[in-house]
Amino acid sequence: MPSVTRKTPSSTSRTQRRGQLRDRLLAAVEQLLAAGESYTELSVERIAAEAGVSRSTFYVYFDDKGELLRAWFQDIFGQLEDAARAWHTLPADAGQPQLRAALSRLVQLYRPHTTLMAAVVDASGYDPSVRLLVAGMMERNTATLRQHIHLGQQDGTVDAGLLADEVAAWLTWMAERGFHQLVRGASDAQVERLVDAYASIVWKTLYEGAARRR
């Protein structure tokens, strides 16, 4: 009688199943948070039950609820970096309207995820791995903007008198707090005004003086 060889699931199919489960669990998290729950107080059992999966299934793919957030955060952070790159690579003759359009894309990409971003901030207060991830994001954002300022000062598109390191840090942290506190829960009209204000701050801080001299 011929032997039967069992095929092990491919890594690709496992990755797909993990991604599908992640999205299902995160949708459940968003529902719970929208209902007033705190991510800190949510248990794996509660999240799994809300998503309609077993606790054991959760642990097949994720070590804990921190890993669930980290898996999502790494993905969305890559998308946000791409959106920021569109801003940093604007042509030298771009004006405030082009800057506003680039920053609007960044805000609109972030906006649907404000609830989960708030959960990440919440988790960073007690989960060292999430805290390191958030710190790494802020360091990378600051470094990228700092490089943009330095390059702009060299080619005359950014005010040469700015302290690049300090300005990059201020703008990065101001944006992070603004996205977290202002964009979350804002109406469409409010978001448009917030984008107007954000673009005005960035334009006047970085580019207006250099553009006037040109």
Image (cartoon, rainbow, N blue to C red):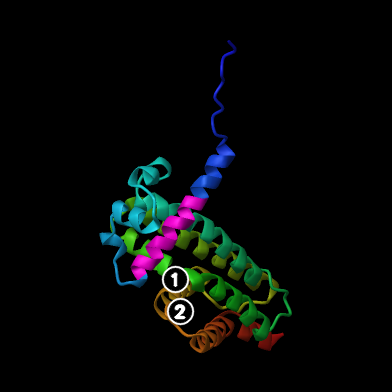
Task: Determine the residue positioned at 47% across, 85% down.
Answer: 187
In this figure, which residue is indicated by the disc labeled 1? 114
The x and y percentages for residue 56 are 35, 42
Residue type at tag 1 = Thr
The tag on residue 183 is: 2
Query: Going from the N terminus, do you reach mark 2 or mark 1 first?
Result: 1
Does any portion of residue 28 appear in the rendered image?
Answer: yes
The tag on residue 80 is: none
Q: Which is the main secondary structure of the residues drawn in magenta? A: helix
**Location of residue 92 by image quarter:** bottom right
Start and end of the magenta stretch? 20-33
**Location of residue 39 by image quarter:** bottom left
**Location of residue 36 by image quarter:** bottom left
Rounded to the nearest whole Å, what is the CA distance between mark 2 and mark 1?
Answer: 8 Å
Task: Determine the residue positioned at 41% across, 69% down.
Answer: 115
Residue 6 lies, with reference to residue 95, above or below; the image says above
Residue 73 lies, with reference to residue 92, above or below; the image says above
Secondary element under disc 2, as helix, strand or loop, is helix
The x and y percentages for residue 152 are 65, 72
The x and y percentages for residue 203 are 59, 83
In this orientation, which residue lies closer to the viewer: 208 or 25? 25
The x and y percentages for residue 65 are 35, 52
**Position of residue 39 in the picture relative to residue 26 (left or right):** left
**Quadrant of the snapshot with the N terminus:** top right
Task: Determine the residue positioned at 56% across, 19% down.
Answer: 4
Task: Determine the residue positioned at 43% across, 43% down.
Answer: 61
Secondary element under disc 1, as helix, strand or loop, is helix
The question of residue 205 being in magenta is answered with: no
Q: Are marks 2 and 1 in contact (CB under 8 Å)?
A: yes
**Quadrant of the snapshot with the C terminus:** bottom right
Does any portion of residue 136 appear in the rendered image?
Answer: no
